Image (spheres, grey):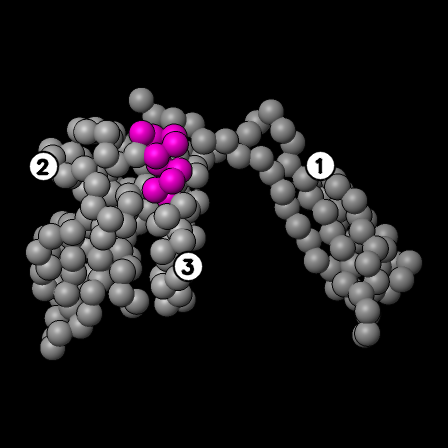
Amino acid sequence: MEPGSLVYDPHTHKVGEYQDKTGPYVMLRPVGGGREWQADPARIRPATPEERISAGVRAANDRSREGITFDPTRPPVPVPGCATCEELAAQRDKARAAFDGSAVTDANVLLRQHQGREHGGESTGRRLFRYVPYTIVQDDSALPEYQAYCVSGEETDCGASSGPCSAPAEVEEWQRRHTQETRHLRYRRSFADYAVLERHG
């Protein structure tokens, strides 16, 4: 487990940032900063996306209640529900996992700049954030697409394609015809659909 990874400790019912292993325990740090605590490495697990967001919201609210406005040494917390914040935070997590400190700093700078433009920054006073859950569902207004590609061939793939089809049966029928005509047996199949996020509450 890499330092900075967010994990859930069932003993304390809290999400924390993994710091290091000390003897038989691991050290976890509260999201947003605070006193570290010891946890059993056999019991902790990676935090779910909902637990990560909830912990970030709680940390932002705690800072607001305590009158903490802007601390340049503290990484900015993504605003829940903002796609740009989440994308920049994901870039930061990826850079942190690769131990690329420069890229982590760049992501933090971009995140602060974005929050300053779109969310009023971190120095505008007391703000409370509310976690808004979403459910991802298939968009019924758009038909899914199925497609097959022939990848038979020793040096190069055949490359023949069924083209977009509205049902798996159409793709399978094309595969049968193509195999009868060419004796090719290997295909790569793909499925594509559209999804929407439905907000709760």
Residue found at x 39% / y 32%: 117
Q: Main secondary structure of the magenta part?
A: helix
The magenta stretch spans residue 150: no
Nearest to N terminus: mark 3 or mark 1: 3
Report the amino acid beneath label 2.
Answer: Glu
Name which residue type carries label 3.
Answer: Ala
- Rounded to the nearest angstrom, the CA distance separating label 2 from label 1 is 56 Å
- Residue 66's label in the rendered image is 2
| Image coordinates for residue 42, horizontal then vertical, percent | 19, 68
Q: Are marks 2 and 3 in contact (CB under 8 Å)?
A: no
Where 179 falls versus 77 (above or below)? below
Asked whether 34 or 52 is in front, the reply is 34
The C terminus lies in which quarter of the figure? top left
Disc 1 marks which residue? 166
> Could you classify mark 3 by the number of other residues whose Cα lies within 10 Å: few (under 14), some (14-19), or many (20 or more)?
some
The residue lying at 77 percent from left, 63 percent from top is: 151
Residues at marks 3 and 1, CA–CA distance in whole angstroms: 43 Å
**Looking at the rendered structure, which numbered label has been put on residue 103?**
3
Residue 64 occupies quadrant: top left
Residue 180 coordinates in the image, percent (x, y): 88, 58
Depth order, front residue of 170/60: 60
Range of residues picked out in magenta: 111-120
Mark 1 crowdedness (10 Å alpha carbons): few <14, some 14-19, many ≥20: few
Neighbours of disc 2 within 10 Å: few (<14), some (14-19), many (20+): few
Q: For residue 145, say whether it is visible.
A: yes
Q: Is residue 4 left or right of residue 168?
A: left
Residue 115, image quadrant: top left
Mark 3 element type: helix
Residue visible at 9% across and 60% down in the picture: 37
Q: Which residue occupies 24% across, 43% down?
A: 56
Name above or below for residue 147 compared with residue 104. above
* Dot placed on the residue nearer the N-terminal end, 2 or 3: 2
